Image (tube, rainbow, N blue to C red):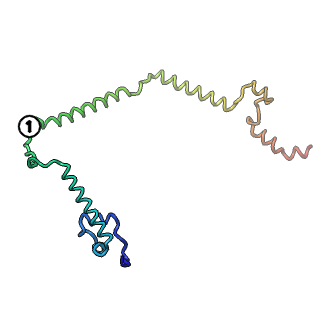
Amino acid sequence: MKGQNNPHLQEGRILWAVIDDEELAADEQQHLQNCPACTSKVEQFQAELQELGHKARMSVPPLSRPVSMPKARVAAVSHSTGWLPFFAAAAMAGVVVFFYFMAMENTAPPVLTPLQVQNNLLEDETLMREISELVEDPLSDDMYEISGEDGIGFDDDEDEFLQFIVPDIEDDLQS
């Protein structure tokens, strides 16, 4: 090695040189001509390929007759098959449409009589009334007795609540 500034060719580029050395770049071709290490690798790959080819020829029996491709046959033209794909597509479309409309019949909403509708509205109104009562008076009378509250607080009259929190000045002067 004469102090080359070019590094040796990579293995992929050496394989490319074995395949076709004219496809290499000009600097790679120059390196290949000047570098004995890279040239010996290329020759080694070529020798291995030659040996592989020789073994392959030895393992295969010789040809007894020439290889020929079968003659192309002309397909028979049938005019009756022109309708078959169209008929198949039409039949499939008919089946899809049939099942689509069958599913629509099965999923139709139930028809309610006016009496049922009126009963549903009354049930909704009763439920809303019970909810309103629970919001206004959440505990039963027994629970108010246990807790010591009478259930009647300042919620009924805001003026009483404000009077309790901020008494009038006149009351203070009298007392």
Task: Give the residue displayed 55% in from the left and 24% down from the top.
Answer: 123
- Residue 5 versus residue 15 in the image, above or below: below
Q: Position of residue 119 (x, y in %)?
A: 52, 22
Q: Which residue is nearer to you in this view: 99 or 14?
A: 14
State the residue position of label 1: 78
In the rendered view, does 28 fall on the left or right side of 90?
Answer: right
Secondary element under disc 1, as helix, strand or loop, is: loop
Q: Position of residue 174 (x, y in %)?
A: 91, 44
In the rendered view, does 60 fall on the left or right side of 64?
Answer: right
Q: Which residue is nearer to you in this view: 49 or 107?
A: 49
Q: Which residue is nearer to you in this view: 84 or 148?
A: 84
Give the quadrant of residue 172: top right
The residue lying furthest to the bottom in this view is: 2
Task: Give the residue displayed 59% in from the left and 25% down from the top.
Answer: 126
Task: Give the residue displayed 75% in from the left and 39% down from the top.
Answer: 158
Looking at the picture, which amino acid does disc 1 mark? Ser
Task: Give the residue displayed 55% in from the left and 27% down from the top.
Answer: 124
